[in-house]
Image (tube, rainbow, N blue to C red):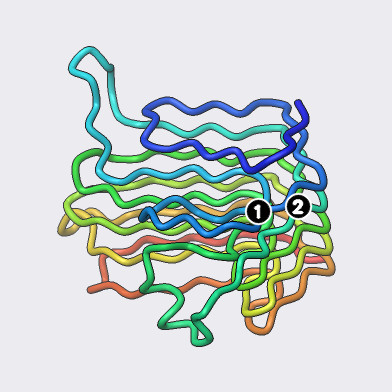
Amino acid sequence: MFSEAVLDIYNTPRITLLGCVFFNNSGTGISRNSFRGNTGAVSIGFNNVELDQQADGQPQVFVSNCNFTRNRATAESFFRSTNSAFFSRIFTGRGGGLGLFVNESLHYINALISDNHFQDNYARSFGGGLYMVIFGANTQNMFLVRRNTFVDNTALLGAGGLLMTFFSVGVRGTPHTTIISDCTFSGNMGESGGAVLTYIADEGNVGLIIHYHVI
């Protein structure tokens, strides 16, 4: 599958991208809608999605065995500081390859990002390869990022390879959890966090486990 433009998937309960190739795409515009990103290739957004009563279970995202190469998120960002950038809910110039933007206080989001290859992607601000952000309280979102490779991705302001950020407390005593496991980072560049940048604005109920391989 070759994409000639940004793939914008919004408030869709079941998302599966399997064995896709996203090559040399460019996101140049600015969405004025919250939690819809200006990514280079793929934007996946949830903003308190209302599920059909017939839908089973919780929203799920599955991205596996995809190749994100030479995609560019280039929309101008007016947020020069890390704080002001993250607290804006309009995401410009972020996620050179893939962006996952979650604002969910109604449902738990389960996401598996596995066995993908991110190479030579670029973001004008944050998350050259992969950008993930969680807003929303009273939920427990679970992200598993495993066996991905991040090679020569660039983000001008930070997180050349991967960015993970939290802006919510989650269910009290049951935090949002992200596991980054068995990933490889090589040659990524960013003003801060060349390989990985994690940003947390929370009251403490956040779980984060990182196990990655840098070569």
Which of the numbered marks, if any, corresponds to residue 119?
none
Which secondary structure, mark 2?
loop
Q: Is residue 11 above or below residue 137?
A: above
Question: Is the N terminus in the top left, top right, bottom left or bottom right quadrant?
Answer: top right
Asked if disc 1 and disc 2 are in contact, CB closer than 8 Å, the reply is yes
Residue type, mark 2 in image: Asn
Q: Is residue 209 left or right of residue 168?
A: right
**Residue at figure coordinates x 72%, y 32% from the top left:** 65
Q: Is residue 114 above or below residue 128?
A: above
Quarter occupied by residue 169: bottom left
Q: Which residue is mark 2?
A: 71
Mark 1 packing: few (<14 Cα in 10 Å), some, or many (20+)? many
Quarter occupied by residue 5: top right
Quarter occupied by residue 106: top left
Provide residue 179's location: percent of width, then percent of height. 50, 53
Q: Is residue 75 above or below residue 18?
A: below
Give 84 or 105, whichever is nearer the viewer: 84
Q: Which residue is mark 1?
A: 27
Which mark is in front, 1 or 2? 1
Give 211 or 30, whichever is nearer the viewer: 30
